[in-house]
Image (cartoon, rainbow, N blue to C red):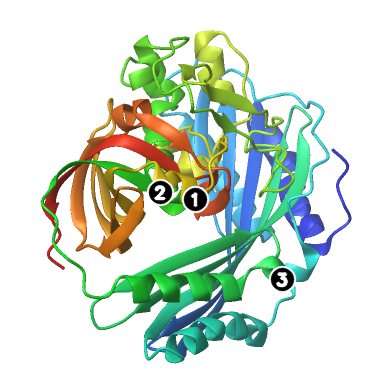
C-alpha cells in the first residue's frame, strides 16, 4: 500500500523504524503498532453549550518473539529513550511466557486495497462549527418549549503497523457523530447521525426527528409487560446486533463451543430475510483497508439469508484452526476483548417505514435501548430498557406513546422471528466501529416489566 506523505504519518513511522532497528538487535522478530487519536467534542445540555474538549492520545505497542516466546509492552511517548525501554521491557516479559508453537512469526506483507476512510476537511473543523451543529438541536427544542441536549463528536485516528517481516503501513480514518436528546415534561426523543465527514452531518434532520419524537411521547400510557410484535428502528437494531455479533462471531468462542454458531455453521438457523456482512471496504461507510497485524481486511458474509455462513479471524486464531485471516485483528491492548466484527452491515429489505407499521396488528415501536447487558452469552439473552420514543401500534396505526419497558430476550431467537425488513438503512456508530442497518419487524419480542425511571 502506498504511504501518503503526511507529517503525522512520518512521525509515527519514524518511531516504528527506531523500534525495528533496536528490536532486531535483541529479539528474533519485532512488531510495532501505534494508535494516535484526536478527539473533538462539543456538548449541549439544557439548551446551552456546556463543554468543548480537544485532546490527543497516543499508544504504542511493541511485541517481540524471542526463542519462540512472545512478549509485549506499551508506552505513550515516542522519544528514543522511551522506545528503547519499551522494547527491552517486552524482551524481559517474553522470558516469562510459554513457548508459542503456532505464533512463531509475525505476518508477511501482502497487497492492501486502496481504500480512503479519511476526510481531510474534518480534521480542520473548528469548535465554532461544531457548536453550530449542536445549537441546531437547542433551537429546535426551544421553538416548542422543550429542552435539548446532545453532542457533536469528531474522531481522527492514525494507524501505523510495522514489523520485521517487511510490513510497513500507515493509514488515517475519520468519524463524525451527532447525537440529540430532546425532553419535555413527560416525554423524550432521540436521533443521531454518523458520517465520515463532519460537513455531511444532517443536524436539522437529527434535531427535528428528536423533537418530533419528544412531542409524540407526551403523556405516555402504561402497557402490560408481555410478548408483542416489535418494530426496532435502526438504532435499536444496532444496539442488539453489535452486542450479539461480539459473542456470536468471536472465533475463540466459536471454536471452543461457546458461541451459538458453534454447532450451527452452514445451517439456515435465522430468518431468511436476514443477511449480515462484515464489510470493512464499504467506501460509503467508514472503511479501513488493513488490520493491526498488517493484513488486508476482507469482507465476510456472516449470515446469508438466514444461513450462518462465515466467521472473522486474525492471524493467530486463523493459524490455530488452519484457515486464513480475514484481517480482523484488534489493537493489541484491546486483545482481551477478542476478535469480533467491527464493520457490520445488515442488508436492507423492501418495506418503507409506513409499510412496516401497517403490518403490525398490536405491537411496539422501539427507538433505542439503554442499560443493555448480556446474561447468557451463548444464546445472547440480553436485558435492557427502551428509551426516548416507545410507541404502541394497533391495527397498523401508532395509537399512543407508552412508558418505557424492560426487555429480556434472546437476540438469536428474535432474529429468527423477523417478518419484514425496512428499505432505508442508517449508519450507527459504536465503540469498535459502526453498524449499518435498516429497521426490523419482529413477530414476537418479550418485555418483562415497566421501567421505573
Q: Which mark is residue 199?
A: 3
Q: Which mark is residue 357?
A: 2
Indicate the quadrant where residue 250 lies. Answer: top left
Q: Is residue 377 above or below residue 310?
A: below
Percent from the top left, x then y, of residue 8? 77, 61
Asked if marks 2 and 1 touch (Cβ < 8 Å), the reply is yes
Disc 1 crowd, CA 10 A, few/some/many (<14, 14-19, 20+): some
Left or right for 393, reference 16: left
Tell me, yes or no, if residue 418 can be seen here.
yes
Q: Residue at x 39, y 27 (%)?
A: 248
Disc 2 crowd, CA 10 A, few/some/many (<14, 14-19, 20+): many
Indicate the quadrant where residue 260 lies. Answer: top left
Could you tell me which quadrant the N terminus lies in?
top right
Residue at the disc numbered 1: 353
Q: Residue at x 68, y 24 (%)?
A: 107
Residue placed most toward the observer, 14 or 156: 156
Percent from the top left, x then y, of residue 16? 72, 47
Residue placed most toward the observer, 137 or 272: 272
**Distance from the alpha carbon under mark 1 to that under mark 3:** 27 Å
Disc number lying in front (1 or 3): 1
Asked if marks 1 and 3 touch (Cβ < 8 Å), the reply is no
Left or right for 216, reference 275: left
Percent from the top left, x then y, of residue 104? 59, 17
Disc nearer the start of the sequence (3/2):
3
Disc 3 crowd, CA 10 A, few/some/many (<14, 14-19, 20+): some
Could you tell me which quadrant the C terminus lies in?
bottom left
Left or right for 399, reference 91: left
- Identify the element where label 2 is drawn: helix
Q: Is residue 336 above or below residue 39?
A: above
Amino acid at each position: 500500500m502506498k504511504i501518503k506523505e503526511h507529517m503525522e504519518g512520518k512521525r509515527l513511522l519514524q518511531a516504528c523504524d527506531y523500534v525495528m532497528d533496536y528490536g532486531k538487535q535483541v529479539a528474533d522478530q519485532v512488531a510495532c503498532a501505534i494508535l494516535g487519536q484526536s478527539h473533538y467534542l462539543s456538548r449541549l445540555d439544557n439548551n446551552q453549550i456546556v463543554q468543548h474538549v480537544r485532546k490527543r492520545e497516543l499508544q504504542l505497542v511493541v511485541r517481540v518473539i524471542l526463542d519462540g516466546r512472545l512478549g509485549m509492552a506499551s508506552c505513550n511517548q515516542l522519544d528514543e529513550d522511551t522506545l528503547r525501554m519499551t522494547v527491552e521491557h517486552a524482551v524481559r516479559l517474553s522470558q516469562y511466557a510459554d513457548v508459542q508453537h503456532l505464533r512463531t512469526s509475525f505476518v508477511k506483507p501482502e497487497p492492501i486495497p486502496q481504500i480512503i476512510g479519511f476526510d481531510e476537511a474534518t480534521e480542520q473543523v473548528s469548535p465554532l462549527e461544531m457548536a453550530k451543529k449542536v445549537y441546531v438541536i437547542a433551537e429546535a427544542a426551544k421553538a416548542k418549549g422543550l429542552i435539548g441536549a446532545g453532542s457533536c463528536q469528531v474522531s481522527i485516528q492514525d494507524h501505523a503497523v510495522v514489523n520485521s517481516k517487511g510490513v510497513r503501513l500507515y493509514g488515517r480514518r475519520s468519524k463524525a457523530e451527532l447525537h440529540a436528546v430532546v425532553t419535555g415534561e413527560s416525554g423524550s426523543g432521540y436521533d443521531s447521525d454518523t458520517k465520515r465527514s463532519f460537513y455531511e452531518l444532517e443536524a436539522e434532520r437529527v434535531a427535528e426527528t428528536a423533537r418530533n419524537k419528544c412531542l409524540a411521547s407526551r403523556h405516555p400510557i402504561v402497557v402490560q409487560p408481555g410478548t408483542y410484535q416489535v418494530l426496532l428502528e435502526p438504532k435499536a437494531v444496532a444496539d442488539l446486533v453489535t452486542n450479539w455479533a461480539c459473542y456470536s462471531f468471536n472465533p475463540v468462542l466459536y471454536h471452543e463451543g461457546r458461541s451459538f454458531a458453534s454447532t450451527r455453521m452452514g445451517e439456515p438457523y435465522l430468518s431468511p430475510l436476514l443477511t449480515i456482512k462484515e464489510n470493512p471496504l464499504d467506501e460509503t461507510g467508514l472503511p479501513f483497508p488493513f488490520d493491526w497485524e498488517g493484513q488486508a481486511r476482507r469482507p465476510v458474509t456472516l449470515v446469508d439469508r438466514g444461513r450462518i455462513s462465515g466467521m472473522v479471524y486474525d492471524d493467530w486464531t486463523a493459524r490455530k484452526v488452519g484457515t486464513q485471516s480475514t484481517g480482523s485483528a484488534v489493537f493489541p491492548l484491546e486483545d482481551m476483548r477478542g476478535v469480533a466484527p467491527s464493520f457490520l452491515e445488515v442488508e436492507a429489505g423492501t418495506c418503507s417505514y409506513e409499510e412496516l407499521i401497517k403490518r403490525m396488528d398490536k405491537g411496539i415501536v422501539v427507538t433505542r435501548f439503554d442499560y443493555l447487558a448480556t446474561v447468557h452469552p451463548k444464546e445472547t439473552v440480553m436485558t435492557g430498557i427502551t428509551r426516548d420514543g416507545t410507541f404502541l401500534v394497533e391495527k397498523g396505526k401508532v395509537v399512543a406513546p407508552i412508558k418505557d419497558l424492560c426487555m429480556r430476550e434472546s437476540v438469536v431467537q428474535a432474529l429468527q422471528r423477523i417478518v419484514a425488513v425496512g428499505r432505508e438503512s442508517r449508519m450507527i456508530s459504536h465503540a469498535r466501529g459502526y453498524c449499518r442497518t435498516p429497521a426490523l419487524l419482529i413477530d414476537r419480542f418479550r418485555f418483562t416489566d415497566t421501567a421505573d425511571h
